[in-house]
Amino acid sequence: MKSVVFFNNKGGVGKTTLACNVGAALAGLLKQRVLLVDCDPQCNSTQLVVDEDTCSRLYWDADAKSATTVMSVLQPIQDGDASISKNATPLLGSKNRFGIDILPGHPRLSVVEDKLSLAWGETIAGDIGGIRKTNWCLYLCRELQDRYDVILFDVGPSLGSLNRTVLLGADYFVTPMGSDIFSIVGVRNIAEWLKQWLDLYDAGVLACERRHPKALEQYNLVRNLAIRRGFAGYTVQQYIAKSIKGERRPTLAFDQILQQMPTEMAGRLGEFAVDKIDAAALKLGDVPNMYSLVPLAQSAHAPILDLSGGDGIRGSGYKQVEKYAKIIDTVARALARNIGIGGKA
């Protein structure tokens, strides 16, 4: 089983749309067993995949406390324990149009940030309890590894403690990029902070081993985190174009950014790249801006590649859907190649 985080410190780059649609492609085209875990307190992935009636049962009805969300998994940590709940029951893909299971997010995830921040301080100090809390994502993946081929994590655009634990606990990460300087600045932030986090984690583990010999083995914790060589690629959102004598051309600003992007990605995140993956293979594809198709997909709770006339597609919209389906197919297959999962299609 492989786990992948879709993450960029810069918001507005189509991360959630990409994560959900790539998940649908991995499940539908490559026949992978896919779980999507929504770790964003805004719950955008959950709102895209899950219909309104199910959301009402999850968050509004009287029995909502018994429903499984990511908050349910983390509740023991919020209550002061060092472990997670082992009773995670994702919503089944047979109940949604994406064909992927989902562990819904929860607005209360922002409350756990304080607990995980404190746990990070304990981790750095070599406290075994802090290291266990920081590794909650790793524990979750292990609990579910026999049920899935791929677990995808969607996280918010921050470098906070919740996202840090998800990144450190996963195998790989993908960075969706926009065609703007702020996406590049976001990547620079990721590179700087990820290196710092890994260095601090390593120091904490060494301190723990000195203070608590064999504690890591007792709690089945790892010394070397997989994410150290986990950069599996990036996508670039479609450029802004303008008409010049009737011809659509990219703006000069985008053209400059586009030329710099491979160098920036290789220079900033290359040290974290998956072993034996060259710089060219890290670019998973260019993703177009879908404009009106996004709200249609949100209303239908469907992947863009599955939208039809019944969902409100008209005229040129069919060609847009077909174009997007081909692009997502390319991105999904490139990601599968980079993380070493085999298509069964």
Image: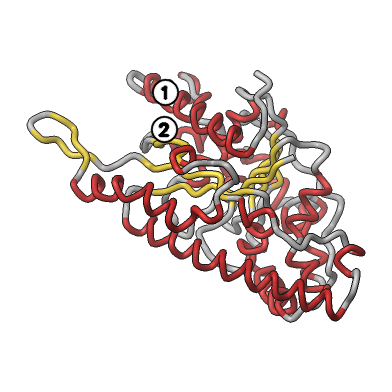
245, above or below 190, in the image? above
Q: Secondary structure at mark 2?
A: helix
Residue type at numbered disc 1: Ile
148, above or below 127, in the image? above
Q: Are marks 2 and 1 in contact (CB under 8 Å)?
A: yes
How has the structure been colored for display?
Answer: secondary structure
Question: At 81% across and 37% down in the image, what residue appears?
Answer: 147
Q: Position of residue 162 (x, y in %)?
A: 64, 64
244, above or below 320, in the image? below
Q: Secondary structure at mark 1?
A: loop
Is residue 335 in sight in this rendering? yes
Kindly indicate the quadrant of the structure image that contains residue 121.
Answer: bottom right
Residue type at numbered disc 2: Leu
Question: At 55% across and 29% down in the image, what residue appears?
Answer: 333
Q: Position of residue 327 (x, y in %)?
A: 45, 28
Q: Position of residue 11 (x, y in %)?
A: 44, 56
Question: For mark 1, what is the residue?
Answer: 313
Would you call the spot at circle 2 few (<14 residues within 10 Å), some (14-19), or many (20 or more)? many
Question: For mark 2, what is the residue?
Answer: 293
Q: Position of residue 16 (x, y in %)?
A: 52, 45
Q: Name the quadrant of the N terminus.
A: top right
Q: Nearer the viewer, residue 34 or 97?
A: 34
Q: Nearer the viewer, residue 272 or 168?
A: 272
Q: Name the quadrant of the C terminus.
A: top right
